[in-house]
Amino acid sequence: MSFDTEHYPGVCAHPSEASRGFVFNHSMVRIKDPAVSLDFYTRIMGMRVLRKLDFPEMKFTLYFLHRPLEVESVPEDTGERTAWTFAQRGILELTHNWGTESDPEFKYHDGNAQPQGFGHLCFSVPNLAAAVAWFDENQVPYVKRPEQGKMKDVAFIKDPDGYWIEIVEPGLLKQLGQAPVV
């Protein structure tokens, strides 16, 4: 039998047929300045903008970013690409409320200061040491470097709005959360 789920109080062992085909598509964070955030997520994190949607009547813009696999074919037609975007996994939606970029005092709550709420995004990388060198080269601020704290081999950086981004190399995490063998 193949793996289905870990079991804990509250976990539904057999999801309803009504939820078959549901896909976690995206998470959204609000950004102050699109030019600064888009530079960070495209240049530093390697993401691509799949779609930009403007809503002038409500004065905001949505940017949908993704890291498509190199073998994926993204539709050229904007309508088809919009539909394709909303069918993907692991999309980051950046929401820009117009005018925030012009207000020097404006700042979003990162979710980690009190009162806590939203915690962080996470990117897995093929080589943690190389990623750390890239972040250092680009002067990306850290919350925690991989060698700091009790949880080793995990880094936390900050994006331009102060949101935390966890950086992990999957192969280094095989023992994460397991009691040490005595």
Image (cartoon, grey):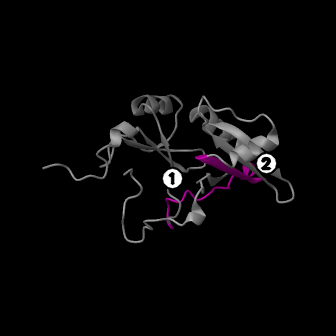
Crowd around label 1: few <14 · some 14–19 · many ≥20 (10 Å): some
Q: Are marks 1 and 2 in contact (CB under 8 Å)?
A: no
- Residue located at (44% from left, 32% from top): 126
Magenta highlight: main SS: loop
Q: Can residue 36 be seen here?
A: yes
Q: Does the magenta run of residues contain 19?
A: no
User: Left or right: where does residue 135 sit relative to residue 93?
Assistant: left
- Residue located at (31% from left, 43% from top): 174
Circle 1 SS class:
strand
Total marks drawn? 2
| Rendered view: 4 above or below 66 | below
- Residue located at (52% from left, 34% from top): 139
Q: Residue furthest left?
A: 182
Give the x, y percent position of residue 8: 36, 67
Identify residue for label 1: 120
Magenta stretch in the rendered image: 89-115
- Residue located at (55% from left, 51% from top): 163
User: Left or right: where does residue 29 sit relative to residue 75?
Assistant: left
**Three-letter residue code for mark 2:** Leu
**Three-letter residue code for mark 1:** His
Q: Residue furthest bottom?
A: 10
Identify residue for label 2: 53
Give the x, y percent position of residue 21: 60, 55
Q: Quadrant of residue 16?
A: bottom right
Q: Does the magenta run of residues contain 107?
A: yes
Q: Choose the circle earlier in sequence order: 1 or 2.
A: 2
